Amino acid sequence: IHNHADQMCWMTVPLGKLRGQNFSVREIDQAKGFCRLKETDNFDLSDCLTAKVELEEPIHQILNLPEFESRAVSLHIYSKPFDTCLSYCRETDTFKEVPLFYTSVDGKLCDNIKL
């Protein structure tokens, strides 16, 4: 479960099927890293349908459920690069900032990336 650091995001699923689950914040204490989430709407993506992250409710997770019985590929496009986001744990009602990593920047592979 993660957010998108105030960035716009669009995604599509060219192979398989995935479910997106959105969340809203019920209660938060940033100093303690505490956050209680509430499930809101969900949506299924397949066959190259597209979805976008709603900035009003940017916390979500993407799931490949067992009942879908297939592998899936998702493609995500972001409005601007960002190298951290918030990751949430519902079991402990906590959140933390986590680093993100790139495969390429400006069309060039990043250090230590081999395809």
Image (tube, rainbow, N blue to C red):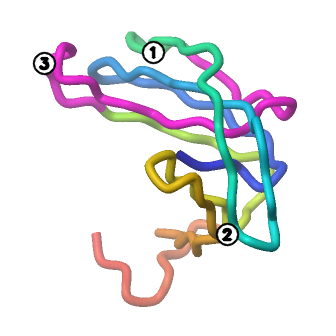
Question: Image point 45% across, 15% down: which residue?
Answer: 45
Judge from the rendering whether residue 112 lies leftward or rightward of residue 96; answer left or right: left
Q: Earlier in the sequence, mark 3 or mark 2?
A: 3
Q: Nearer the viewer, residue 106 or 100?
A: 100
Q: How far apart are marks 3 and 2 (CA)?
A: 32 Å
Q: Mark 3 points at which residue?
A: 69
Mark 1: which secondary structure?
strand
Q: Does the magenta stretch include residue 34?
A: no
Q: Name the residue under label 1.
A: 45
Q: Name the residue under label 2.
A: 84
Q: Earlier in the sequence, mark 3 or mark 1?
A: 1
Which disc, if any, is residue 59? Answer: none
Residue 8 found in image quarter: top right
Q: Position of residue 60 (x, y in %)?
A: 59, 36
Q: Do the residues under discs 1 and 2 have CB atoms within 8 angstroms?
A: no
- Residues in magenta, as a range: 50-72
Q: Does the magenta stretch include residue 69?
A: yes
